[in-house]
Amino acid sequence: MTALALLGGSPLRTRPFRMWPQFDQAEFDALADVLNSRRWGGIHSGSEGESFETELAAYLQVPHAAVVSSGTAGLMIALRALGIRPGDEVVVPAMTYVATATAVSLLGGLPVFADIDSATHTINSSAVKAAISEKTKAIIAVHLGGQPADMDGLGAVADTYGIPIIEDCAQSLGAAWNGCQTGSLGTIGVFSFASTKNITAGEGGAVVTHDDELAARIASLRDHGRPPGGASDHPQLGWNLRLSEFQSAILRVQLARLKDHLAAKDKGAAYLASELSSVPGLRPVPVPTDLDPRVTAHGRFSFAFTFDSEAFGGEETGCTSVSVFRAALRAEGIPVSSRDLVACPDEPIYAEATSRDYSTSRTASATQARAACARLVLLGQAAGSGLLFEESAELADVVHAVEKIHENRCHLSREQRQPGRIHV
């Protein structure tokens, strides 16, 4: 049995996987064009920003898209456009990146955490229904990891109570539900173009909608409260949350190759799902053959699987923690997210009253979210890697590394019990 690299053995893989983000000469040329234009920012006719908005709207099949400085900025704009005010409640998933909730808090609203579906890890419509109160003004549905949330179930709840849905599509550009792109299904859709996202300019975001009145309000809020069209007056309070021309130019190039990128990542994910499903204690999420038929395209932001700590331990040596498992994978040369996942209501700003920036929230339910955070392992862009673009011959090293760890599980769990022996 070959010793684990984490315990002093040789790593299974020493050469790197493909990097993320991906780029080529097209990005260089687009940046040079903006540089030479000497129009590097602002909102103006014929701009890169305007062109990207048009192309993104066409891709999503929505009439309105507004580029903004980040996905978080987009969420704040969406909430303000819908009239969210201090004291209003907004239902958010108990498992999501914290910005989904802090966007509500920064506007003085109260995030209400509702539990997730244990299979898809997206917000559960029954949990949402149970979380609604007379103060609820919106629901934020997060399409986590590229997996669309149950928009049929959420839509039924929203219709019953007359509450708008904001889609947090930070990780789902390219995903579709019943043939419709995520972002086009709710009242407002919000996208992020930060470094790990499916298309990226380092930072950036977009807010999309079918509603003409909301679109005008959104465009105004990102530009100091000025009405769209270049008017100089300021009839409402707004922010400067515009996107630079350099970022818009890069995003236009990246959007053009999104289809090919998604196809390549789907292929890589399918291989990993097939091969890793036979390893005791691992369950790919979601397994492509088990997808809800309403999910007509997956966003493939990441490849995730759940880790059963008991299956990677022994009767005498105990369990192997997910943190140690991830450390063992990294030591074997497999890029994996190193950050421990934390359910949103357990973040210090919501859970610890002594935190300097403690913010009020309400937790309706979070049992499944906490369980998922304790056992999820993330590969791909979530780990800052282009691993999913690799061919099967390269991805086989991921499978071999997992198998190696499983074969050595008794040694790993035994060492884990010795204080200071393993650093994660």
Image: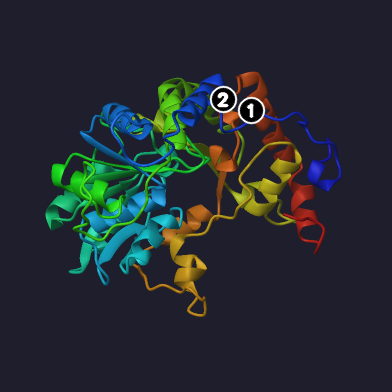
Residue drawn 47% across the image and 35% down it: 246
Residue type at tag 2 = Phe
Q: Is residue 364 visible?
A: no
Quarter of the rendering occupied by the N terminus: top right
Residue drawn 67% across the image and 55% down it: 319
Q: Is residue 10 visible?
A: yes
Q: Position of residue 228 (x, y in %)?
A: 21, 44
Residue type at tag 1 = Arg
Around disc 2, counting alpha carbons within 10 Å, would you say few (fewer than 14), some (14 to 19), or many (20 or more)? Answer: many
- In the image, residue 56 sits, relative to residue 365, either above or below, namely above
Q: How many marks?
A: 2
- In the image, residue 263 sits, relative to residue 191, either above or below, namely above
Q: Is residue 255 left or right of residue 310?
A: left
Q: Is residue 225 left or right of residue 399?
A: left
Residue sitting at the far right: 8
Q: Position of residue 116 (x, y in %)?
A: 38, 53
- Location of residue 383 by image quarter: top right
- Are dots 1 and 2 in contact, CB under 8 Å? yes
- Location of residue 17 by image quarter: top right
Label 2 element class: helix
Residue that badge 2 annotates: 389
The alpha-carbon separation of the residues under discs 1 and 2 comes to 7 Å
Q: Position of residue 60 (x, y in %)?
A: 29, 31
Residue 18 badge? 1
Q: Is residue 309 left or right of residue 166?
A: right
Q: Position of residue 20 (x, y in %)?
A: 58, 33
